[in-house]
Image (spheres, helix red, strand yellow):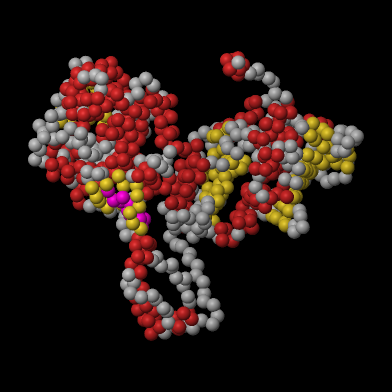
Amino acid sequence: MASEDSNKTAEPLPICRLHESLINRIAAGEIIHRPASALKELIENSLDAGATSIRVTVKDGGMKLLQIQDNGCGIRKSDLSILAERFTTSKLKTFSDLSRIQTYGFRGEALASISHVSHLSVITKTKAESCAWKACYAEGHLASPKPGQSIDPKPCAGNDGTTITIEDMFYNTPTRLSALKSSSEEYSRILDVLTKYAIHNPKVAFVCKKAGPMPKVFQHPSASEIPNTIRLLYGHSIAKELVPVKVSSKAKKSIQEDEDEDMEADEPEDDPEAWHAEAHITNANYQAKKMVFLLFINHRLVESSRMKRAFEVVYNGILPKGSSPFVYLSLEIDPRSVDVNVHPTKREVHFLNEEEIIERISDAFQKALAVQNHSRTFEYQTLLTGGVASTEQDFSKKRKGKQREDNDAMDVEDDESSSNVSKAPKLKKTLSQHKVRTSLKDRTLDSMFPVTNPAQVAGSSSQGQVQDEPSARTLKSREVKESTCFLTSVLDLRRKIMKGKHRQMTEILEKHTFVGIVDLQRSLSLIQHSTNLYLVNHGSLAEELFYQLGVRQFGNFSRMKLDPPPPLRTLVEIAVNAEESTKHSKLNKSQIIDRIVKILMPRREMLAEYFSLCISDAGLVESLPLLLRDYTPNLNNLPSFLMRLGPQVDWASEMECFDTFLRELAYFYTPGETVVPVSGSDDEQAQEKAERWQIQHVLFPAMRRYLSAPKSLLDRDVVQAASLPDLYKVFERC
């Protein structure tokens, strides 16, 4: 039965043609996101109709009612039957018309989309007709206003122009309706759209009325200049700091406020790359927390993250950190150089020579701001009535009090006469038990001079010499970049690391300060984070670090060349002879050595390609993978590492093979007690000093940078040893 069920589920599903109503509803969701996006489409239709007055009525944030009334040219009665059908428009007839389009709309999808997600009605009248006509729409077609009535448009009273009423928006898409913000939030978005179009169209009057128990009215009468409109809508604080800027494709420099050069007259009519821009930007005296960026390209309200970043760079050298400007930019480009059909809501457009135009406009902004930057205005607040001027004696007392505060000897208490003048808010003092007196940027002298392990110098190691020594290079760690890999098993290992990341533990390691090594043999060290002191097992942390570095660099390891290359069989034999657990095996030591060598030799190509572990045909170990620059593992553990590759690596499965091999490689790199003892070495102190230097100045900085600490480290490898606030509590009792 199980096989029959699996066969049924494996069969491909039939391909069906979607119903037209479902297609239209899906398309409507791409265009009409919220009431503000519907309003944007309708305002553009009104402006295309030549309206000079636009009135908007909003109820419940536009979700219950959104009505827009204009005095444009209106709609013919004969066109009402197809008004709300998709792809019905008066803006173009052929595809070539798209390259010369100068109107806001052109696809004929706005009213169709609205009719699929709301109840839509239209009242319209042209100047040639004696009365207005009213029509209702549902699902893109004419609908009867009440059951039993005809669907044909009905005559009614009305003014010249068009009134479009949208009711119960998203009534048939409850998921979209529930995802909308509150009614006040949607109303603010509607006002934002109206404000932007009102600034760009100063000769059009805009009125917005919020219906409800406490009606609100947004009113913008027609004005003659854009700066006046900005003053009315954004306030005097922005308007008084505006700097006008004009620039064109032929102008060599920006035109300032006193110049009235006509840019359009200078542009050749037949040049498809001609453009000109007019902007109003604030100078350095205006500073806001959030940037206000109004961008119109060919009178179309659009967004451009590239332009916004470029203008932010211009202001970075002028405004303080965290401050932002106000920028209004109107860019007019030849329609042949603009592609307006790149976004469902026409929010973005593409045009030729984008980088050059942005650079020219940014340079013009820079020059205009440089002229205005010679002087700045600073505002101050006068004292309230009843203030008493302070004498020289009062100021001297206040100055002495300030000195006492700086010396932390006692709290500052201003004199009564000084407090009468003004009382500045006191900064909250940080208590001693909460002060952090260390910094991550602190650096000691010994970190600048690498300490070399004498066991790894030429002639001191029986396993060979590592060709590139840390002392021979400058101690400038390179970034360990993540390799590009398309193997599913490796990608799964990387995802597993990120999924198991413990946020708090990783933050401790990222922002820790190294205190010192407590016990080198037991791999214990002290680190500080904030006001806490932690005892950590740096061996376990290093093992996890090297494992993650192995996964990070899979297939792109640097190589650590061994010169001269030691024989593989000899190294395995050394480890097997030193391993006591082989006594309990059914195989003798010679058979164990043969089996391990037979496992590794046929897999030489795979080991070299994925892990940079190169073994020659003659069985010589030529190179090892280098996981971290400026860190050399203890090569006395190399025999044990090669021996463990035989039984400890799961060679049968790809993912388990990579995982277990990298675990063994990390274990080999981990600092700790040497498996193969060093006989008769007089450099034990030098070796210990070199190991301590590597742990402090190489391992812990690498942990700070690359280690995504798993939660398992908290079980036994990281313990909080002390807390400064707790210590202060103990001292207070003494």
Residue 380 vs 331, above or below: the answer is below
- Percent x, y of residue 243: 52, 55
- Percent x, y of residue 72: 76, 43
Q: How many marks?
A: 0
At a point 39% along the width and 79% down the height, the residue shown is 398
Quick check: 711 left or right of 94? left
- Determine which quarter of the picture holds residue 213: bottom right
Quick check: 589 left or right of 232? left
Range of magenta residues: 525-535
Quick check: 6 left or right of 544? right
- Determine which quarter of the picture holds residue 676: top left
Main SS of residues in magenta: strand
Q: Determine if residue 70 is in view.
A: no
- Percent x, y of residue 719: 34, 49
At a point 43% along the width and 51% down the height, the residue shown is 316
The quadrant of the picture occupied by the C terminus is bottom left
- Percent x, y of residue 297: 58, 41
At a point 33% along the width and 54% down the height, the residue shown is 721
